[in-house]
Image: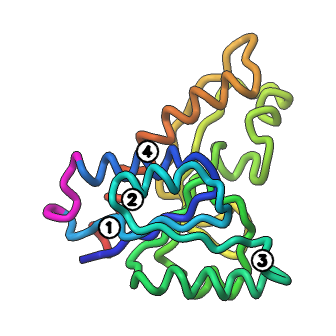
Amino acid sequence: MKNIVILISGTGSNMAAIMRAAERERWPERLGARVAAVISNRPDAQGLQVANEAGIATSVVDHKAYEGREAFDAALRTAIDAHAPALVVLAGFMRILTPAFVEHYAGRMINIHPSLLPAFPGLHTHQRAIDAGCRVAGVTVHMVTAELDHGPILAQAAVPVLDGDTSDTLAARVLAHEHVIYPRAVASLLKKL
């Protein structure tokens, strides 16, 4: 069985979308894969309760409990590796990871970013797209590399920027597309692993 470990920091809406797809599409039978665990860097992350209610193992590696990024990444790596992951999925995980951590999961760690990369890496993507006068925004699923939001692109979805859009209205439309393309990208990658 290919184990998927999902990392979250908040509500876990993309995590929930992946969990629903795994159940609906019978990933254990069809792909030999399952969501084995959800790990958060925040003890108050709402997504932990969602995962618990679905019967998925959860744990917390609180980044505030560690002296620096390397110590946190070492503890996180131990927690992830306890589940022997075939794939590590970042789903709203709001921590920058060290190059050594990224290298450990090279070729089997993916992320979702709310822009059409390579445009607008980093934060505040929706407002930046509006401020730049973009007529199209979107979402990208990509492999994680040491360079922030710059790994090979696995999937993208375009979303029009409408007159009168705010960062919140644009974000809501982009999020709806995230919930569709992220599970598809995960399933597609699992077929290759």
Residue 124 in percent (x, y) is at 80, 41
**Label 3 belongs to which residue?**
65
Residue at left 64%, top 74%? 61
**Label 2 belongs to which residue?**
186
- Mark 2 is surrounded, within 10 Å at the Cα level, by few (under 14), some (14 to 19) or many (20 or more) other residues, namely many
Callout 3 secondary element: helix
Q: In the visual, does 192 lie left or right of 88?
A: left
Mark positioned earlier in the residue sequence (4 or 2): 4
Mark positioned earlier in the residue sequence (4 or 3): 3
Q: Nearer the viewer, mark 1 or mark 3?
A: 3
Relative to 186, does residue 167 appear above or below in the rendering? above
The reply to whether the magenta stretch includes residue 27 is yes
Residue at left 49%, top 77%? 107
CB under 8 Å between discs 4 and 3 = no
**Main SS of residues in magenta:** helix
Relative to 22, does residue 4 appear above or below in the rendering? below
**Label 4 belongs to which residue?**
181
Q: CA distance from mark 1 to mark 2?
A: 6 Å
What segment is highlighted magenta in the picture?
A: 24-30
